[in-house]
Image (cartoon, coloured by chain):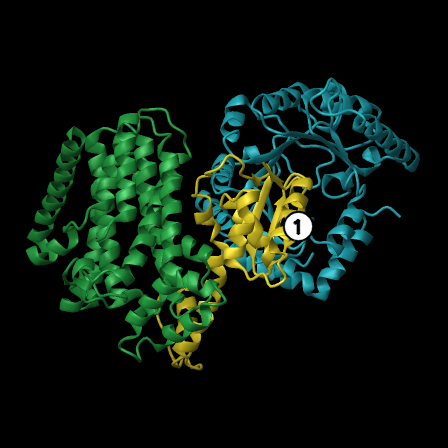
Amino acid sequence: MGYSDLIRLGWRTGKFLAPAGERLTRERGPRPDPEERRGLIRGEMEEIVRREAADALGCLAPRGEATMKLAPFVKFREEKFGAVLFETRSEKVFTLNPTAAGVVREVLAGASEKELGERLLARYADPAGKLQGEALTLVRQLKDKGLLTD
Amino acid sequence: MQTLARLEESLERVRAGMEARAARVSGRVGSELADFVSRPGKMLRARFAIQFGAALGVEPSQAQTTARAMELAHNASLLHDDCVDEAGLRRGRPTPNSVFGPSVALLLGDVAFTQALEEVLDLHPKAAERLVAAAREMAIGELQEEFLRGSLEVTVESYMGIASRKTGALFEWGAMTLSALSPLEHAAADPQKLGLSVGILLQIVDDIHDFTLKDSVAGKERAKDARCGRVTLPGVFALSDPAQRPRFVELWRSIGKDPRAPAKLTRFLEDSGAMDRARERCREVALSVVTLARRLPVRSEVREFADFVSAMAAREF
Amino acid sequence: MRIDSFHAPLAVAWQLTNRCGLECLHCLNGSGPRTPSNGELTKEECLRIALDCVECAIPYAILGGGEPMLSPRFMEVAETLGRGGVWLKIETNGQMLRSAAAGRLSSLPIRSIQVSLDGATQRTYERLRPGASLQAAVEACRTVRKAGLPLEITFVPTRFNVGEASAAIDLALELGAFRFNTGRLILRGRAVENRRSLELNERAEREFLRLLTRREAEISGRSAGTSGRGMEMCFRPFTFEEQVRSEAAEPSGTLTILPDGRVSASAAGDAVCADLRTHTVKEAWRSYLRARQGTWVEEIWAGLCLGPATRS
């Protein structure tokens, strides 16, 4: 009987006594490699902090007049593949790829349509020169779908 | 001048209160250890609490209590952080972990946190509960940062999120507590946002200073974050620029192998403009704080508070 | 939509209790005043789960039961979720909803309050819901609207009340509901016992569907905010079996939490896949995803469609 079995026995019986005659053995198993464990946790942590990034974005007060925001009843949530917009009224879900998620993040951080292009170009490469235009198209589509509002 | 005199008087009361706590603990553990628990530093959190409290019309003794709680909770986190980072210096003096070992420093941090809780037990019904939540967020932020050591996948947003927890959470607590104590009408959501933003601002400034300040001015070792494998905002900006990323990674990986690597990295961050982008982000956050502060009810104190925030953004130590 | 790529559910449907002050003839959970409540989650467990939902950034929670407002945890759970940014839908019979509660709820992100109105007259309403007051339910709707909260109405068509369906739609419009929900009676729970007296025959059901289609066309010609108020008519999918198939093909990413903390892999409450007393929400979500992949889930979906509750 290993230690964890002994513990469970204690929970069940309330009598924390090793059963007479039972052989108590050291639990064996491969020792985890600390560096490897750390590496695995690091990967998980990178995902977690990306997801919790929205904590800080809402703190920046809008500076300009023309700032956009999520429409009422709409929630934004980061995911590994990008993000989702959930329109809770219709219960419709819209998935966003990483670039689209980046656009919405900038909007939530207070970027107006005018500032959006500049902010995105500061973060993402744009070899085809289409980023600004596509971001504005996306924003307009999201407004048309009632997911973003002025 | 009158406002400054009042501020100094309040800060003096906060310091006196902390010294009184140190005196009580010294009877149990000796004066040298007690000093580590309650010794005040730059008192930025205390200044924040007093000035923000004034702008909300909070009664001064309540603002001072909030200030003391913030300073003690901050001391607790520093005592623990110095163990995590194996730091030898803090506020220009040897850390307790370097003198007595990490176990002592951890226990001193626990004592400091209990003192912070004791301060607020009678302050407001929710104050202690919320301080526990703030401490949780601070610890989670630190844990997240700890496990991101060595990672080059930190984005600006992730960095801001971690800063909002490990530093912002305590300011958020202070702001929300003062808001609850305020007898004056004000927009309910503003203090929380404002407190969080001030905390993030402070973190960005500290992270820039980690590269730019001399050891004697900083009171701690230079480029400590980089030595610990932690990418902070200037580095995050460098990583996010495809043109700068390779050189940043090369210099980053040479830390620990090349004794001049921290200095080279600092110069690179300045020359490449990444440090300036961090300073620009600092200004944006400060501006957002001032925008929110304009809505605080006691107009005569708002200007002082805004000046304090600007001074924090521009400070040199 | 690939829900297995989501790190957490998109929604939780949380049955806070199986108890109810009423004993409706068609209740699919078989709830009533005598339904035992032992085994339900404690306050600490409820709040821990609510905080876990907040930490997982779950966007949306539906609080139901039984009658959720009968649960002593109701307001604290709603406030914990709401203050954490979770949009809430409350499904209630309206018998207990007063202005104090509506006032508290109005400070939260309420997506809607759904009130059951199964008739336009007290006599008809009470036939399906013995002891219930239509007036109380109507007052609840007015209270919801007065508090500035979105209102939706649910109407379950049976032999007793289908003749008042049009009047019920008018009542919902007058009360300012943004949505009128209806569909075929779900033959589960107490509805199975009372099936003979409740179930519409095929002809009555066809007429009911025609009425709904006609009223939908009329109402969509109006617009909210003008003299003619708008309201969505929500009746597709019409049958429970269609709903189940639709959910199987296009899952909504919703975890159903039962009153004792167990998590169901199906909306019907069968096929428990986790227990929030001992699992976190994230662990429950992973179990749910594994359960959905297993072939036994397909059998359950099939069983739901082929069991005694199914009309041929």
Q: Tell me: A27 left or right of B87.
A: right
Question: Helix, strand, or loop for circle 1?
Answer: strand
Q: Nearer the viewer, residue C159 or C145?
A: C145
Report the chain shown in yellow: A
Q: What amino acid is labelled 1 in the image? A: Phe
Q: Position of residue C51 (x, y in %)?
A: 47, 47
Q: Nearer the viewer, residue B196 or B169?
A: B196
Report the chain shown in cyan: C
Q: Tell me: A100 left or right of A25.
A: right
Which quadrant, please, contains the N terminus of chain C?
A: bottom right
- The residue at 53%/38% (across/down) is A67
Q: Position of residue C240 (x, y in %)?
A: 78, 45
Q: Tag 1, which chain?
A: A
Read off the residue under disc 1: A94
Q: Position of residue A41 (x, y in %)?
A: 45, 68
Whether B114 is drawn above or below B241: the answer is above
Chain B rendered in what hue? green
Q: Tell me: C24 left or right of C55.
A: right
Count of marks overlaid on the render: 1
- The residue at 47%/53% (across/down) is A53
Q: Nearer the viewer, residue B45 or A30?
A: B45
Residue B120 can be seen in this image = no
Q: Position of residue C183 (x, y in %)?
A: 79, 37
